[in-house]
Image: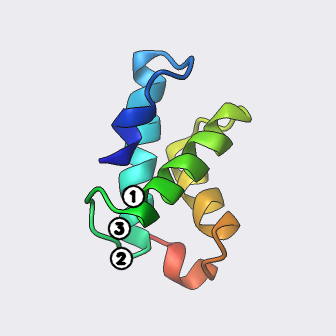
Amino acid sequence: MAIYRVKHFAFDPEEIDTIAAAYHETLLALYLPQRDEPVTRVVARKVIEIAQSGELDRVCLRTRATAELGVPSRFAAA
């Protein structure tokens, strides 16, 4: 899973758990398998980029990630 390869960023363990949960929920919202494929890395990078901006709410991370990846909101609700 791509999210664990980028854990070296400055997040505490609880934040990493939140980011990982948002990543998995985003994959589910996008109907993507949780495998090591290039597209899942794009999703991981987007979730982490948003988290680095200060957003650490799981639902907001998922919602923003799907929106910023260009997915219509009706498909992003999970």
Q: CA distance from mark 1 to mark 2?
A: 10 Å
Proximity of marks 3 and 2: CB atoms separated by less than 8 Å: yes
Residue under label 1, please give it: 25
Residue under label 2, please give it: 31
Q: Residue at x 54, y 23 (%)?
A: 9
Q: Residue at x 63, y 68 (%)?
A: 69
- Tell me which amino acid carries mark 1: Glu
Where residue 74 appears, as percent x and y from the top left, is 56, 84
Proximity of marks 1 and 3: CB atoms separated by less than 8 Å: yes
Q: Residue at x 40, y 18 (%)?
A: 13
Q: Is residue 5 left or right of residue 71?
A: left
Q: Between 16 and 44, which is closer to the camera in this rendering?
A: 44
- Tell me which amino acid carries mark 3: Leu
Where residue 21 appears, as percent x and y from the top left, is 38, 45
Where residue 75 appears, as percent x and y from the top left, is 51, 82
Residue under label 3, please give it: 28
Say which label, 1 or 2, has the lower sequence index: 1
- Tell me which amino acid carries mark 2: Tyr
Q: Mark 2: few, some, or many residues within 10 Å (few <14, many ≥20)?
A: few
**SS at badge 2:** loop
Which quadrant: the C terminus? bottom left
